[in-house]
Image (cartoon, rainbow, N blue to C red):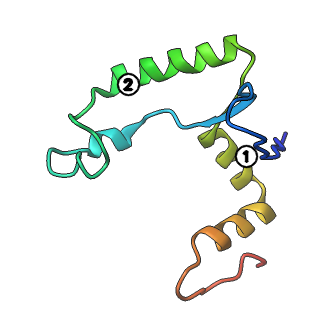
């Protein structure tokens, strides 16, 4: 089951209808005191607390009838279909040397 979303912004004051979100995951554990400023963090966050806050925020948006689209779920749907995933990968990854075609 695919999701078709048309992006169209008339102005920044209309009611939010849909939002694309990514739930914080293991990538947060890769933050160190050396790189956290580069990623605009003032301190290393606590992953469990960050996920709880994110889930609560998602719930608040759903309660307001805002369509919440989860990036990981959408990406898995795309990659589950061979043709679209090849197109997506070839546009996003653009390998320096392609050894094998997606068509094979």
Q: Position of residue 33 (x, y in %)?
A: 14, 44
Decide which of 27, 5 is in the foreground and name it.
5
Where is residue 23 shown, x and y percent of the image? 50, 33
Q: Nearer the viewer, residue 27 or 35?
A: 35
Which residue corresponds to the image point at 71% horizontal and 27% vertical from the top-left?
16
Residue 63 disc label:
none
Q: Secondary structure at mark 2?
A: helix
Q: Earlier in the sequence, mark 1 or mark 2?
A: 2
Question: Which quadrant, please, contains the C terminus?
Answer: bottom right
- Badge 1: how crowded within 10 Å, few (<14), some, or many (20+)? some
The circle drawn on residue 77 is 1
Q: Kindly state the secondary structure of the residue where label 1 is placed.
A: helix
Q: Tell me what residue is drawn at x 60 percent, y 87 percent.
A: 99
**Residue 6 position (above or below residue 67):** below
Measure how far apart labels 1 and 2 are at the Cα level: 26 Å
Query: Which quadrant would residue 32 be assigned to in this image?
Result: top left
> Which residue was labeled with disc 2?
50
Please state the total of marks drawn on the protein image.
2
Instruction: Quarter of the image for the N terminus: give it.
Output: top right
Residue sitting farthest toward the left:
33
Q: Is residue 101 toward the left or the right of residue 35 in the image?
A: right
Return the residue nearer the eye: 28 or 9. 9
Local packing at callout 2 (Cα closer than 10 Å; few below 14, some 14-19, many 20+) is: some
- Image point (78%, 62%), residue name: 84
- In the image, residue 71 above or below residue 45: below
Look at discs 1 and 2 and give the one toward the viewer.
Answer: 2
Residue furthest toward the top? 63
Contact between marks 1 and 2 (CB within 8 A): the answer is no
Residue 98 shown left or right of residue 16 in the figure:
left
């Amino acid at each position: 089951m695919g999701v078709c979303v048309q992006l169209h912004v008339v102005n920044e004051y209309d009611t939010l209808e849909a939002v694309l979100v990514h739930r914080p995951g293991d990538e947060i554990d890769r933050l160190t005191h050396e790189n956290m400023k580069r990623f605009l963090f003032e301190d290393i966050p606590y992953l469990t607390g960050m996920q709880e806050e994110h889930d609560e925020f998602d719930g608040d948006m759903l309660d307001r009838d805002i369509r919440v689209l989860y990036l990981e779920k959408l990406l898995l749907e795309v990659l589950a279909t061979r043709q679209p995933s090849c197109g997506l990968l070839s546009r996003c990854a653009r390998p320096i040397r392609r050894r094998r075609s997606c068509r094979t």
